[in-house]
Image (spheres, rainbow, N blue to C red):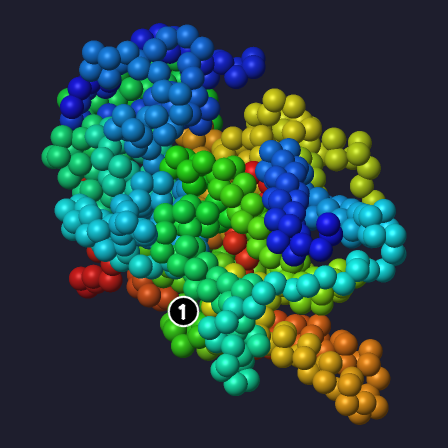
Amino acid sequence: MPDIEFFNITKKFGELTANDDISFKILSDTVHCIVGENGAGKSTLMKILFGVYHPDKGYFCIGNDKKVFSSTYDAISNGIGMLFQHYMLIDDFTVLENVILGREPEKKFSLDYRKSENILRELIDKYNLNLSLDKKISDLSISEQQKVEILKILYRNSDIIIFDEPTAVLSPLEVREFFNIVLKFKEDNKTIILITHKLNEVKEIADRVSVLRRGKLVYECTKEELDIEKLSINIIGEIGEKDIVTRKEDVSEKKTLINFKNVGYISGNRKILDNLNLELKTYEIFGICGVEGNGQSEIVRLMMGMIKPSEGNMYKIIGEISLVPDDRIKKGMIENFNIGENILLKSPLHYISKKNIRNISKNIISKYDVRVPDFNVPMSALSGGNQQKVIVAREIELDNKAIIFYHPTRGVDIKATGFINSKIIEMRNSGRAILLISSDIDELLGLSDRLAVLYRGTVSKVFEKNEIDFKDDISRNVLLEKLGKLMIGINQE
Amino acid sequence: MYNSIFAGFVAAVFINLLLSILFSVFTVKLKINQIVTGVGFNLLIAGLAKFLLILIFHSSSNTPRFENFPSFPLFKNIPGVGELLSDYIILFSFALVFLSQYVLFRTTFGLRLRSAGENPEAAESLGVKVRNYKFYGVLISGFLTSLAGIWLASNQNGFSDGMVAGRGYIALAAMIIGKWKPYNIFFACLMFAFFEAFEITIQISGFGIPSQLIQMLPYLITILVLVGFIGKTKPPASDGIPY
């Protein structure tokens, strides 16, 4: 496969320069990571390569051929595939129908389903995708849906595959599986471009790394030169801006606000929670790690009073609980409302003037460092990180005694992650009881006062603070391995 | 000169295709809300039909009587259903059940047509020309509704104002109850037809039940069937959303 080389790519959206004179090379048959914060211009650059956008200036070459694609279809025909963050799948179609759409094998008067099936089976086996072709998309998990998207790309014979933050929605085990697929691609001489902001993943899989910041290419290195510290400095820019709030001393008089005693929850005939015990206390961040679907969302729904336990008891001595939900777009906000309106969604009913809303927006924007082009724009105009800041702001401002953070930094850039993490600690220091559910192990280890492993609806182990402190990479890895095993149900004690 | 059923057939199909093109210009090209456009067309055409009736035939209620199509001879002597099966349009409508099932679920055209209704962005990203398929869809439905109109008028040997009597809406209800699947829709249509025939029979026999009550039956059944028997019906995800 030929190399890809960018020459002076510049792309402007109105006043904003998304890509500013970017030139670099992506070597063939490698895994090339492109890292940077949200809004750094990574996706824009890749969408130029994929024919979604046209550069205002500059061009790129694949091998020795100068290319500009007029559409994504054009890019696909030239052997490029891209996996977007938002999947383009048809819920009511089967896996097979989704994959072959637009390029269907045909018999004389009809679609050749058998031939399609054979072609796809072969690809599935070759790359261990583990998918069944006649299932509907609406019955698949997120990671399976991702595999369907990958299969779509493979079916179109792409040799250059762009992944836009593919692991943001995956659990640790699924990430492992995904990386194995990527490595297999590399073996097959495909070129993989990976957009991400998880640095430990870069360390694990990248052959080369390019860092973008505010539309510019600021740093490049190879696998051998890779240094996480240096990389993160280049991503964020100014070092002083990390603003991590240090944790205060432990307080002795913690108060239990929510107490689960042998709680079970049955849905249909499936036991989702089983003999679950946990306590949420003031001045404490209680972390939960586990593979998605082991009862996390049921714990949240029980605490929020949306469902009742089928067995056992849940004692709750507070009324309202704040919740930062796992899916900010579907559960956390109304996209067409502006910031102030979204903040007011949870306030008691009263007359609201336009001025009132404006003031609330302005207040939140300055207090929580939300970056907006204009305070009156709808939420949909904000980047993911800024949307999340608004939701976190709303839940904190409610001033409740307990706050649930459910995947608080999923798909959020490093800077906003740092900000949200420091807010979580700030809330803990002010005496709130905090439940933190996350798939980001580093986040859990860094923030939790106690960390529980959830497996098949029950807490299989609780780590105290001193058990999850680690001094160096070696003890971190030991800890990670232990957690990883517990998460898939291997308990060595 | 007015009395050629074949000229009528050609004119009806032609005008319906013309209206379909106009409808797709509004909804597919100009992206105007489909329901608003549909209601507009509905009112316009009901009025236009009456207007033309007065203008051409000098009657505000009906056209002069005309002859029906010649009948299809092959099944004529089968007892019971012979009359039904000697009608070309009815025969075609039976074939249509299988034809549409085949086209929708076995051909590339059908897959792409459905994808345009489910998730046009996804379809377009794979090179499916969504607007073209939407246009084909409107054109096909225009052609089929023209057949329905032709059948109604030819069967009554004349057009009279208001003779459609809301059957287009019943067709929509049949589509919903049939969950957008041809075989199911066929049975939903049979059910509605049964209750309509039932209504007429009861009225003729003069049982003393108020006719308004009986006329409610098909609608009542629709509601009952929707809430009670068939569970959730899910329209195509992008049904009615301009793209």
The crowd level at tag 1 (other Cα within 10 Å; few <14, some 14-19, many 20+) is many
In this image, B226 relative to A193: left or right? right
Q: Is residue A126 visible?
A: yes
Q: Is residue A234 visible?
A: no
Q: Amino acid at mark 1?
A: Leu
Residue B42 horizontal/vertical position (percent): 74, 51
Which of the chains bears the disc numbered 1?
A
Q: Which residue is mark 1?
A: A273
- Helix, strand or loop at label 1? It is strand
Foreground residue among A131 and B72 = B72
In this image, A290 relative to A356: left or right? left
Residue name at image x 61 percent, y 22 percent = A373
Q: Classify the position of the C terminus of chain A by image quarter.
A: bottom left
Residue B183 horizontal/vertical position (percent): 47, 68
Foreground residue among A304 and A460 = A304
Residue name at image x 49 percent, y 82 percent = B78
Q: Classify the position of the N terminus of chain A by image quarter.
A: top left
